[in-house]
Amino acid sequence: MALALHTFPTVKDAGAALKAGGTRYIGGGTLVVRAVNEGDVSISGFVRSADPALSVIRISGGTVRIGASVTMAAIARHADLAPLAHAARAVGGPAIRNMASVGGNLFAPTPYGDFTVALLALDATVSTDDGELPIETFLAKRESNHAIVTAVGFTLPKEGGFRFLKVSRVKPKGVSVLSIATVLEQAPDGTVSSARIALGCMADRPIRASAAEKALIGRKLTADGIAPALAVARDGTSPPTDPIASAWYRNEVLPVHLGRLLLA
């Protein structure tokens, strides 16, 4: 079956075209094209926008705005986004990173979406042609959200404040067993004053480890200090069982890898 691809100069025009049944928005194509190749007959055509703003990275005073069409490869090589380079490189191999976009990664189902885990830890906002949402709100209803993502925005963390880990069985580009991102701030005495911990592959979409975050506050990043956080790291999770790993295995290794990341 032939699939039509319609390109529009603005996001508004592309959004109007999406109202036609069966059409899907295409960014890098790593998700929707694969779906078609695997037999998804509900897709009858693709819509995209050539708006240059979708491919722009803007950084001003520590505030970052990344267009939805910006690729993982572009993020990985951007000097001012060096803290995020590891998370961007966690997405597939070189060919995938040259196509995979920030906007598309927000919709990637478990066990994919590693960069979205980083954005969740960074407390990003998601801009669409319909407004702006906190990333947690966006992720909670992404399947029912028919707006086109235009950009993500966040504040760069302090030096050393962002940490990211992807656990996979195949190196260097295997699918995730789980992924973890943290943004931590410490008081002058070394205790944690603020903590955001995001988990990938521990639910059907990236989630916060809220109990672990609370348990870290006022504690030092030592083996004894982080022990209460590791004890509740699984709270609120519902990991899947898939060909990569079982739910039991993911639950078992989460505290181990979270501990290693916090002590790194």
Image (spheres, rainbow, N blue to C red):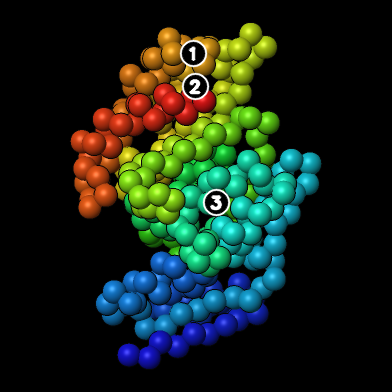
Q: In which quarter of the image is residue 41?
A: bottom left
Q: How many residues crowd mark 2 within 10 Å: few (<14), some (14–19), many (20+)?
A: few
- Total marks shown come to 3
Disc 1 and disc 2 in contact, CB within 8 angstroms: yes
Which residue extends farthest front? Answer: 171
Placement of the N terminus among the 4 image quadrants: bottom left
Residue topped by disc 3: 88
Tell me if residue 174 comes above or below residue 61 in the rendering.
Answer: below
In front: 166, or 12?
Answer: 166
Q: Callout 2: helix, strand or loop?
A: helix
Query: Could you tell me the amino acid type at mark 3?
Result: Ala
Distance between the Cα atoms at labels 3 and 2?
22 Å
Query: Could you tell me the amino acid type at mark 2?
Result: Leu
Residue at (36% x, 45% y) in the render? 168
Which residue extends farthest bottom? Answer: 2
Residue topped by disc 2: 263
Residue at (74% x, 40% y) in the render? 62
Tell me if residue 2 comes above or below residue 40 in the rendering.
Answer: below
Q: Can you give x and y, in whole percent of width and height, for residue 238 in the image?
A: 27, 39
Q: Callout 1: helix, strand or loop?
A: loop
Query: Could you tell me the amino acid type at mark 1?
Result: Thr
Q: Callout 3: helix, strand or loop?
A: helix
Residue topped by disc 1: 222
Tell me if residue 173 comes above or below residue 1 in the rendering.
Answer: above
The disc, 3 or 2, on the residue closer to the chain's N-terminal end is 3
Q: How many residues crowd mark 3 within 10 Å: few (<14), some (14–19), many (20+)?
A: many
Q: Taking 158 as reference, is 184 left or right?
A: left
- Using the rendered image of the protein, determine whether residue 149 is visible from the camera's viewpoint: no
Q: Can you give x and y, in whole percent of width and height, for residue 256 in the image?
A: 35, 26
